[in-house]
Image (tube, rainbow, N blue to C red):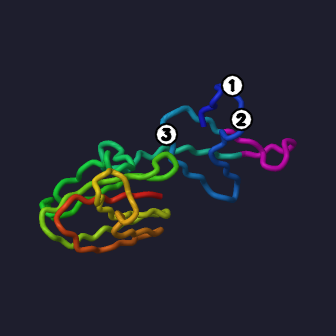
Amino acid sequence: MTPTARNKQIDSGEVLETASNGFGSETQTLVPGTYYVRVSPRFSSFLSTRYDLSLVATPKPSNLNTDPGETLSGAPSVGILNQLPTSTFIARDYVGVQDAGDAFRFDLTETRTVNVRITSDNWTQAALIFDANGNGLVDPGDTLATAGSISSSGTTRSLAPGSYFVLVTP
């Protein structure tokens, strides 16, 4: 992590992850910044140990132009779901340490059966929301259904015409 005091010291709270031989590799999603990797002997500073270090930066596999954010009031509209080609919207993005959630708005102009499916390699949840009072907040009773799992989970609901939201959270 970028040192907060820029003192070129590893201060408390600045170590993001540690990995040691025999425990495989560590993967971390990082925000832009300057980072450091420190390699040190595991048991004794009197032994010399050969190591191979590999750093790989994987591009964010998002199909979204910008991060949608986690608020209903700022949720980008994916359009009128029953009028989209094949009536399908697919979002591929990240939520987690640096991104608390992603909200999407969709509209229906006629009653439709809507399936919300989420697939993830970590625990995530997708909540289907109807903002009954239009205040832009998720109030008690606004969540119509949730789906979440480590692999794939979904929920199907018949929805009347209106504006709805899907909120994806870790």
Residue at far front of view? 133
Density class for disc 2 (Cα within 10 Å; few <14, some 14-19, many ≥20) is few
Residue kind at label 1, given as amino acid type: Asn
Distance, label 1 to label 3, CA atoms, is 20 Å
Q: Residue 43: x and y, percent?
A: 83, 50
Q: Is residue 48 magenta?
A: yes
Mark closer to the chain start, 1 or 3:
1
Q: Is residue 166 above or below residue 7?
A: below
Secondary structure under the numbered disc 2 in the rendered image: loop
Q: Is residue 144 magenta?
A: no
* Left or right: residue 132 compared with residue 140: left
Of residues 102 and 138, the one drawn nearer to the viewer in this rendering? 138
* Left or right: residue 131 compared with residue 160: right
Which quadrant holds the N terminus?
top right
Name the residue at 19% across, 61% down. Answer: 162
Q: Which residue is mark 2?
A: 11
Mark closer to the chain start, 3 or 2:
2
* Left or right: residue 86 compared with residue 42: left
Q: Which residue is mark 3?
A: 31
Residue kind at label 3, given as amino acid type: Val
Secondary structure under the numbered disc 1 in the rendered image: loop
| Chain part drawn in magenta | 38-50
Residue kind at label 2, given as amino acid type: Asp
Q: Residue 89: x and y, percent?
A: 24, 59
Q: Which residue is mark 1?
A: 7
Name the residue at 67% across, 59% down. Answer: 23
Asked whether the beta carbons under mark 1 and mark 2 sit within 8 Å of each other, the answer is yes
